[in-house]
Image (cartoon, grey):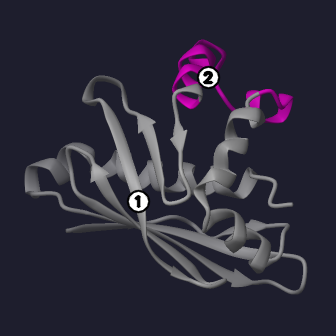
């Protein structure tokens, strides 16, 4: 197993609001609406916008699962396997070429903010780690950035 951790991100919403949103994955469908935000669009290269919009529009959400198209490898799906109220939501892959566990931790930062950190533990052999390890390091940070941009109201 190879473990990758994001940098700690600050979120301007309470720990309970962030947990409530992440503990029910249907709440994350707001990601689709965020693509219309000019601030979000400014962070996506113009030549990739169509590809990103297509991928996001194909995402499927239930209370416990999310499925994300992943180009030539098909669709990756994750499922919530554990919820620690207001502290952590843990996921595992259910449809992925590589098995992994992912968790999102939340810590309070006063009454109106919190910190989040994303960790992924992937079942990679030595060769796979060499090929995709740097992508996972970047990807876990990008995922944390995305979670930090979600409105948790």
Q: Quadrant of the C terminus?
A: bottom right
Residue with the mark numbered 2: 53
**Residue in the picture at 77% in, 66% down:** 11
* 53 in the magenta segment: yes
Q: What secondary structure predominates along the stretch shown in magenta?
A: helix
Residue 149: % across, % down: 75, 51
Residue 84: % across, % down: 55, 85
Packing grade of label 1 (10 A; few <14, some 14-19, many >=20) is many
Secondary structure found at label 1: strand
Q: In terms of depth relative to the viewer, which is nearer, 59 or 142? A: 59
Q: Earlier in the sequence, mark 1 or mark 2?
A: 2
Give the image quarter of residue 67: top left
Q: Where is 46 relative to 150, above or below?
A: above
**Residue in the picture at 83% in, 35% down:** 39
- Looking at the image, is mark 1 or mark 2 nearer the viewer? 1
- The stretch of residues the image draws in magenta is 36-56
Q: Quadrant of the N terminus?
A: bottom left
**Residue in the picture at 59% in, 56% down:** 25
Residue 127: % across, % down: 9, 49
Residue with the mark numbered 1: 79
Q: Is residue 141 left or right of residue 15?
A: left
Q: In terms of depth relative to the viewer, which is nearer, 46 or 68? A: 68
**Residue in the picture at 28% in, 60% down:** 100
């Amino acid at each position: 197993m190879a473990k990758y951790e994001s940098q700690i991100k600050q979120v301007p919403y309470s720990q309970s609001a962030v947990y409530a949103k992440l503990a029910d994955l249907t709440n994350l469908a707001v990601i689709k609406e965020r693509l219309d935000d000019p601030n979000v669009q400014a962070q996506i290269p113009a030549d990739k916008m169509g590809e990103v919009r297509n991928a996001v529009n194909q995402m499927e959400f239930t209370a416990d699962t999310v499925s994300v198209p992943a180009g030539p490898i098909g669709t990756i799906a994750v499922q919530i396997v554990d919820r620690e109220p207001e502290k952590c939501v843990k996921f595992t892959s259910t449809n992925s070429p590589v098995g992994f566990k992912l968790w999102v931790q939340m810590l309070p930062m006063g009454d109106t903010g919190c910190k989040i950190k994303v960790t992924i533990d992937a079942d990679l052999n030595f060769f796979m780690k060499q090929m995709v390890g740097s992508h996972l390091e970047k990807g876990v940070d990008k995922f944390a950035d995305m979670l930090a941009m979600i409105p948790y109201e």
